[in-house]
């Protein structure tokens, strides 16, 4: 099993009090692979449904965010590779 | 400096951790100047004023805190950030001659000011101590007198050398029979102001003393000439003044004009310094609703500080000249409202 990787980028180095702060987290793991399962139902007379797909992620990563100033970071988006967080300066 | 830590963990418990540091700046300090270096205490009452500009001539015998200005010491001790503009310019006739005075038991004789500045056609050109006079040590007594008073006052402040070098040099200068172009005057000023900063820094100064040089900021080439890296390395702030004198002038455009030039033209040392707006104002002749214009300033300053580059950290409203508040009570109320708005809080 491989270890995960993570990098972060803030949208500024200095914020004024009250500014919106945006953090972009980019993460991955060599073991984390999306798997797409396609299901087709066929009846006894050979009639098939349209294929239905579902995507599953094997060994998904969990992100934890802490801030030593006590600032709360809220997740705005996450597509499994890039997550966006927001806080108030 | 706050730090945010992000950990990614897989189902097997393997982790990767990274961090990012950031800063949350202090609020911008809202400031003021009252005409004639007047006592502003009554005007400041009930407002979030944390910064103040004052003007003194090195020719004057009373620079710190100034003649009949004990209130300046009181404000400084109470935490008001003072920007003290110290000018080689002579403010009037009474002392426009040689001066002899004693400082800490030593007698100094300083010759009459030999330079003319602000040579606008059709006006009487003010006198100033000349850049050659500074470089030859003839003005050291003036600096010693100022230093002794400053140490006695013992309130750390920003010492802004010159009010507006561009205004001083715009029409050339003369000194002791020599005539100098605007660009030549800028180069001479850089040498002389470097001498003055170096002179003060070599001596004991109250804690939290900082330095800057003054510019109106209305001429790009002059701004570049007067802010070389060697001088900026000795200074703590960039500085320019901001006035709205046309109905078309927006706060954002007026505050960012000199900033844009600085960012394009100056070196990394200069651009690492925060910005002190020693004067800002809106002229009632063209913009009679001064209150409305003042109300747009917080958002403009916040926007400029959000875009990167040197941060504006103090803005001192100039209630005099072009910025005179007419009527005063309405303008002052607008200023107090502005200073209770982000980024001033």
Image (tube, grey):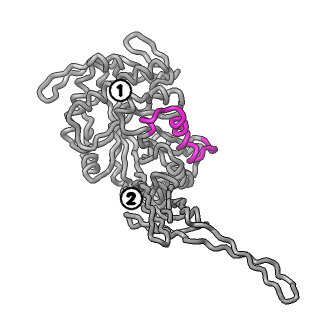
The residue positioned 28% from the left and 50% from the top of the image is B75
Q: Is residue B249 magenta?
A: yes
Label 1 chain ID: B
Which image quarter: residue A39? bottom right
Q: Nearer the viewer, residue B214 or B17?
A: B17
- Position of residue B113 in the picture relative to residue B202 (left or right): right
Please report the bounds of the magenta region as a residue range: B246-271
Q: Looking at the image, is B216 positioned above or below residue B134?
A: below
Rate crowding at label 1 as few (under 14), some (14 to 19) or many (20 or more) other CA atoms within 10 Å.
Answer: many
Q: Position of residue A81 (x, y in %)?
A: 58, 63
Secondary structure of the residue carrying tag 1 is: helix
Q: CA distance from mark 1 to mark 2?
A: 38 Å
Judging by the rendered image, the residue that carries numbered circle 2 is B2
Res A35 seen here: yes
Q: Is residue B210 magenta?
A: no
Q: Position of residue B160 (x, y in %)?
A: 36, 35
The residue positioned 44% from the left and 58% from the top of the image is B18
Q: Position of residue A48 (x, y in %)?
A: 84, 82
- Position of residue B166 in the picture relative to residue B67 (left or right): right
Q: Position of residue B102 (x, y in %)?
A: 16, 26
Which image quarter: residue B158? top left
Judging by the rendered image, the residue that carries numbered circle 1 is B193
Q: Looking at the image, is B128 positioned above or below residue A61?
A: above
Label 2 chain ID: B
Secondary structure of the residue carrying tag 2 is: loop
Q: Nearer the viewer, residue A23 or B190?
A: A23
Q: Looking at the image, is B246 positioned above or below residue B222?
A: below
Location of the C terminus of chain A by quadrant is bottom left
């Amino acid at each position: 099993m491989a270890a995960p990787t993570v990098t972060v980028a803030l949208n500024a180095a200095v914020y004024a009090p009250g500014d919106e702060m945006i953090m972009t987290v980019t993460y991955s793991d060599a073991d984390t692979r999306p798997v797409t399962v396609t299901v087709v139902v066929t009846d006894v007379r050979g009639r098939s449904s349209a294929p239905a797909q579902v995507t599953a992620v094997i060994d998904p990563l969990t992100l934890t965010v802490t801030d030593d100033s006590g600032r709360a970071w809220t997740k705005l988006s996450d597509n499994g590779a890039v997550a966006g967080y927001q806080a108030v300066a | 400096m706050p730090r945010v830590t992000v950990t990614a963990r897989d189902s097997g418990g393997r982790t990767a951790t990274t961090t990012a540091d950031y800063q949350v700046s202090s609020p911008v300090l809202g400031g003021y100047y009252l005409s004639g270096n007047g006592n502003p205490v009554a005007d400041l009452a009930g407002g979030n004023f944390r910064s103040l500009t004052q003007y003194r001539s090195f020719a004057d015998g009373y620079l710190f805190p100034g003649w009949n200005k004990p209130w300046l010491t009181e404000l400084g001790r109470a935490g008001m950030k003072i920007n003290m503009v110290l000018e080689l310019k002579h403010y009037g006739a009474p002392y426009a001659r040689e001066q002899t005075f004693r400082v800490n038991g030593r007698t100094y004789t300083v010759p009459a000011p030999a330079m003319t500045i602000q040579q606008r056609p059709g006006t009487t050109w003010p006198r100033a101590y000349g850049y050659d006079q500074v470089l030859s040590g003839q003005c050291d007594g003036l600096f010693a007198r100022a230093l002794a008073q400053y140490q006695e006052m013992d309130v750390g402040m920003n010492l802004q050398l010159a009010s507006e070098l561009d205004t001083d040099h715009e029409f050339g200068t003369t000194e002791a029979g020599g005539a100098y172009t605007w660009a030549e005057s800028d180069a001479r000023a850089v040498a002389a102001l470097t001498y003055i900063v170096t002179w003060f820094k070599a001596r004991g100064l109250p804690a939290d003393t900082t330095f800057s040089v003054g510019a109106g900021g209305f001429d790009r080439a002059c701004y570049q000439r007067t802010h070389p890296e060697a001088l900026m390395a000795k200074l703590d702030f960039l500085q320019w003044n901001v006035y709205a004198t046309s109905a078309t002038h927006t706060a954002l455009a007026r505050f960012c004009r000199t900033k844009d030039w600085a960012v394009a033209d100056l070196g990394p040392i200069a651009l690492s310094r925060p910005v002190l707006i020693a004067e800002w104002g809106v002229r009632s002749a063209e913009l009679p609703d001064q209150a409305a214009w003042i109300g747009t300033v917080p958002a403009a300053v916040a926007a400029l500080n959000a875009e990167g580059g040197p941060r504006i950290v103090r803005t001192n409203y100039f209630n005099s000249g072009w910025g005179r508040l007419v009527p005063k009570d309405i303008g002052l109320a607008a200023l107090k409202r502005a200073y209770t708005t982000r980024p001033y809080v």
